[in-house]
Image (cartoon, rainbow, N blue to C red):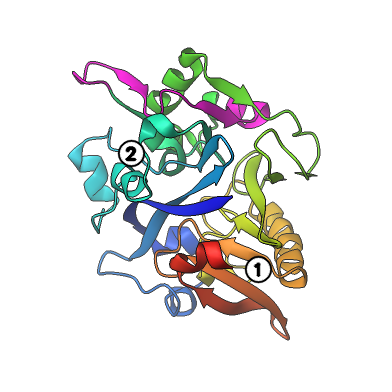
Amino acid sequence: MKLHAIETGNFKLDGGAMFGVVPKALWSRANPADDKNRIELAARSLLIEHGNRLILIDAGMGNKQDDKFFRHYGLWGNHSLEKSLHNAGFSAADVTDVFLTHLHFDHCGGAVRWNKNRTGFELTFPNATYWSNKAHWEWATKPNAREKASFFSENLVPIQKSGQLKFVSKNGAAYTDESELGFGILFVDGHTEKQMIPHISFNEKTIVFAADLLPTAGHLPLPYVMGYDVRPLKTLQEKDSFLTKAADENFVLFMQHDAHNPLITVQHTEKGVRLLEILPVETLNSL
């Protein structure tokens, strides 16, 4: 097995929304804001090279929306999904599986693109199986008013119509050790219904793709919960359980949205679970 960090692009979001009820004086220590109160974020995907499979976990926000949309999210840097795949030695046609932790636009937008003539949409990964779970797919395609702005039909309908969509089968419990993708999945409901958190066994360690259960290292304190979460009290419980296990078992956390801390480990302290070490992304395959 070999792992590749795929940088799909960087963006910004309002710091208050990212930290909910936590005062700016506290969250800005770890995540300083710009003059529009926005903090720097990444959309970092993970590519797993394993046997004859090439599995991409999440695909960033893509480039289908207009300039006004992207100005709102303050895109910065020069990363892109295509360039990062190329730098890893692959093309979109090589990807065999696209695993979507959940269907908010910044996680699945890059999985669908404009067709050549920009008359409609097509799958970015033409040879891939696209993976979700039934409960979350129904949640996303019949969205509640709170999340409606995060679920875009142009990201979902082409996948549904393609015939390449599959649902993971073991989603009745909170955690499954083994999925069709060859890694464990933790199902969490605080941020959105049945978000999937991959747990990958690698070099005798567990690499966890943290997704929106833990957006940045600055979110380690339990009360630091995003204003975007539909069930913040549930997030508190899920974070507590997850971070306790992460510290107990020395998980390496792959940080999807932390622009400056791509890999971290955590430890127990008198204040709760806190940061232990920040690891450069280049060390991913030598952990």
Instruction: Give the position of the C terminus as an image quadrant.
Output: bottom right
Q: Residue at x 22, y 49 (%)?
A: 71
The magenta segment: 115-139
Q: Which residue is mark 2?
A: 62
Q: Nearer the viewer, residue 223 or 62?
A: 62
Residue 189 pos. (x, y %): 67, 44
Q: Which residue is mark 1?
A: 222
Crowd tier of the residue under label 2, counting other residues whose Cα lies within 10 Å: few below 14, some 14–19, many 20 or above: many
Give the CA separation, mark 2 to mark 1.
31 Å
Crowd tier of the residue under label 1, counting other residues whose Cα lies within 10 Å: few below 14, some 14–19, many 20 or above: some
Horizontal side of 44 relative to 79 (left or right) equals right
Residue 260 appears in view: yes
Instruction: Please identify the residue farthest to the front as the structure is shown.
Output: 51
Q: Residue at x 30, y 51 (%)?
A: 73
Reply yes or no: does residue 56 show up in magenta: no
Using the image, determine if residue 158 lies above or below residue 149.
above
Horizontal side of 265 relative to 173 (left or right) equals left
Along the polypeptide, which appears first: circle 2 or circle 1? 2
For the residue labelled by badge 1, is the local secondary structure a helix, a strand or a loop?
loop
Horizontal side of 282 relative to 265 (left or right) equals left
Residue 67 pos. (x, y %): 18, 40
Q: Nearer the viewer, residue 39 or 7?
A: 7
Instruction: Please identify the residue farthest to the right as the structure is shown.
Output: 173
Residue 266 pos. (x, y %): 64, 74
For the residue labelled by badge 2, is the local secondary structure a helix, a strand or a loop?
loop
Q: Amino acid at mark 1?
A: Leu
